[in-house]
Image: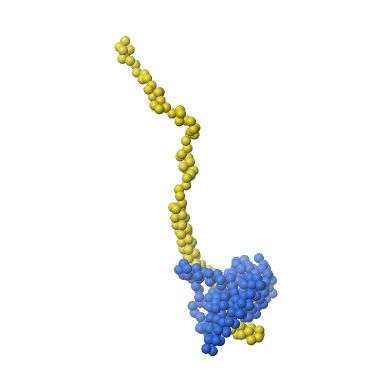
Amino acid sequence: MTHDDESDQIRALLREAHRGDERCPPFRKSVGESAARRHAPRNARTVHAAALAALAAIASAIGMLSLRGERPPPTSRPGALASSWRAPEGPLDFLLELPRPPPLEAFPSLRVPPQVKRR
Amino acid sequence: MTMRTCHIGAIAAPLIAAKREGCGVENASCLEHQLADLHPKSFGWAVACCRYDRLEAEEVLQTSYLKVLSERARFEGRSSFKTWLFGVIRRTAAEARRRRLLGQLFLVRLERLRPQATAAPEPPADPEVVQLLRGLAARQREVLELVFYQDLSIREAAAVMGISLGSARVHYHRGKENLREALAQRGRRGAG
């Protein structure tokens, strides 16, 4: 088979596959329908797009929540830092701690003795 | 915006939305005229892009016209108008295919504005031939369609398909080889 024969055969095949193309819709109809279509199906399309977006948002929220649950608790958070703030302690501060309660707790009472009242 | 002067008489009807939306009347009518000239060939190419499904091809062609006339797709003059338009149709068909697959995946009923009242059932092409062509890889089929049915050069076919000339040549030769093989198998089946 020569090159031209092969080309002719391919052309014939393609012509056969396109046999119904002569009855293509008129240009005016295609343009008119495309213009009409531009406005008509917008509602349905918008509803579908909104539904898809809502589904995607819900799915992503669920995914984020599940990921958050699996994460180990953070060791240092800003809130935790604020609540755990104390005055700094030196390494030898334990030497200043007393084994008993401090002596000032035994402060003398200022009541007047009874014999003084009699006078 | 690319403004091209058109000396062909303006086509009055239908008054499409594109004219009202800022692309000058002269430009829009010129576009319409060019589209009308190429309409039969564009339909043939849309049919090929939709794997010989004519109803889907009509939808794709309508969407492509809508893109062109509303200037969502703009002709910049880097190639011939026909090459550019065929590229738009090819992309639109690919988008439609993806949307349909996605719709099937999410079980969403995408609206399909198929014309309900067609005039008469079209004479179907030989199903065996259609099957033969569908058996080819998409790019091989496309390049053969463009070269042998639309009478474009391989360079122009490459521009339509958005691939390099070398790739187009490879697809062209492989497509011919595969088609030859498929035809030989078909002949053997017929003889046996």
In the picture shown, does residue B129 fall above or below B109?
Answer: below
Q: Is residue B36 left or right of residue A51?
A: right
Question: Chain letter for yellow?
Answer: A
Colouring used for the render? by chain
**Is residue A80 at least partly visible in the picture?**
yes
Question: Chain letter for blue?
Answer: B
Q: Quadrant of the N terminus of chain B?
A: bottom right
Q: Residue furthest bottom?
A: B191
Residue lying at 45% horizontally and 28% vertically, measured from the top left = A96
Quarter assignment of residue B92: bottom right
In the picture shown, does residue A50 fall above or below A92?
Answer: below
Query: Residue B188: x percent and y percent?
Result: 55, 86
Q: Nearer the viewer, residue A34 or B40?
A: B40
Q: Is residue B103 left or right of residue A2?
A: left
**Is residue A28 at least partly visible in the picture?**
no
| Number of marks drawn | 0
In the picture shown, does residue A101 fall above or below B114?
Answer: above
Residue lying at 36% horizontally and 20% vertically, measured from the top left = A109
Q: Nearer the viewer, residue B155 or A32?
A: B155
Q: Nearer the viewer, residue A47 or A13?
A: A13
Query: Residue A34: x percent and y percent?
Result: 55, 72
Query: Residue A14: x percent and y percent?
Result: 59, 82
Residue lying at 63% horizontally and 80% vertically, measured from the top left = B148
Quarter assignment of residue B185: bottom right
Query: Residue B75: x percent and y percent?
Result: 65, 69
